[in-house]
Image (spheres, rainbow, N blue to C red):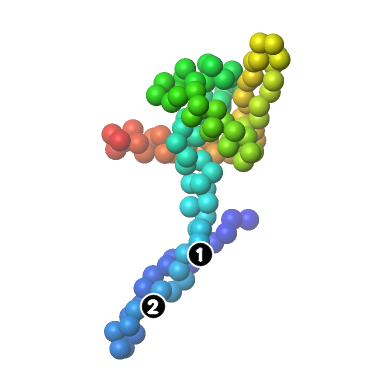
C-alpha cells in the first residue's frame, strides 16, 4: 500500500508567526526515489537494459558521453541497489553482461513519463 502524506503548508498565527503544518519528512518519498534512479546515467542505463542483457563495452558505447570509469561506477552502485544484475560470461578474456532486475524494471514506467515530459517541453 502506498504511503500517503498530507500536503505540507505554512500557517501564520494571529501574532504573524509562521509554522509548518505537515512538513516533509527527510527524505520524502520523491527524494528517496530520486536517490535511487536519479543519479547521472542511471536512467539511461536502465532504459538500455529494458529489452535484453547488454555487455559492458556495448553499454558504454550506447551511453556516448559517459566514460568507462563512470559507467563502471554507476553499474556497481546500481547492482548494490538491486536495480541490475551482473553476469560473468567468461574469465579470460573477462566479459560481463548486465540484466535489469524486477526492481529495476519497476522504475521503467517512471522513466517513460520522464522521457515524455522532457520531449514535450523540449528539454
Of the numbered discs 1 and 2, the one sitting upstream in the chain is 2
Q: Residues within 10 Å of mark 1 (few under 14, many from 20)?
A: few
Query: What is the residue that sits farthest to the bottom in this orientation?
Result: 15
Point out residue 107 in the picture as x, y percentages from the top left corner: 54, 39
Residue 49 occupies quadrant? top right
Name the residue carrying label 2.
Answer: 19
Horizontal and vertical percent for residue 24?
Answer: 47, 64
Residue found 50% across the figure and 61% down from its top:
26
Observer-nearest of 39 and 100:
39
Whether residue 119 can be seen here: yes
The reply to whether the C-beta atoms of the residues labelled 1 and 2 are less than 8 Å apart is no
Give the quarter of the figure containing the C terminus.
top left
Residue 49 sits above or below residue 15 on the image: above
**Which residue position is annotated with label 1?**
25
Label drawn at residue 117: none
Q: What residue occupies the far top of the structure in this picture? A: 93
Q: Nearer the viewer, residue 103 or 109?
A: 103
Which quadrant holds residue 121? Answer: top left
User: What separation in Å lies between label 1 and label 2 (alpha carbons)?
Assistant: 15 Å
Q: Residue at point 39% right, 24% down? A: 65
Graded by Cα atoms within 10 Å as few (under 14), some (14 to 19) or many (20 or more), the crowding at tag 2 reads: few
Amino acid at each position: 500500500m502506498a504511503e500517503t502524506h498530507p500536503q505540507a503548508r505554512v500557517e501564520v498565527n494571529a501574532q504573524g508567526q509562521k509554522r509548518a503544518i505537515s512538513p516533509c519528512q527527510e527524505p520524502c518519498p520523491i527524494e528517496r526515489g530520486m536517490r535511487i534512479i536519479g543519479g547521472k546515467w542511471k536512467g539511461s542505463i536502465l532504459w538500455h537494459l529494458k529489452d535484453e542483457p547488454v555487455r559492458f563495452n556495448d553499454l558504454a558505447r550506447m551511453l556516448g558521453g559517459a566514460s568507462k570509469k563512470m559507467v563502471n561506477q554507476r553499474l556497481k552502485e546500481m547492482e548494490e541497489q538491486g536495480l541490475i544484475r551482473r553476469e560473468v560470461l567468461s574469465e579470460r578474456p573477462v566479459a560481463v553482461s548486465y540484466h535489469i532486475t524486477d526492481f529495476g524494471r519497476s522504475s521503467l514506467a517512471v522513466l517513460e513519463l520522464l522521457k515524455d515530459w522532457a520531449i514535450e517541453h523540449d528539454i
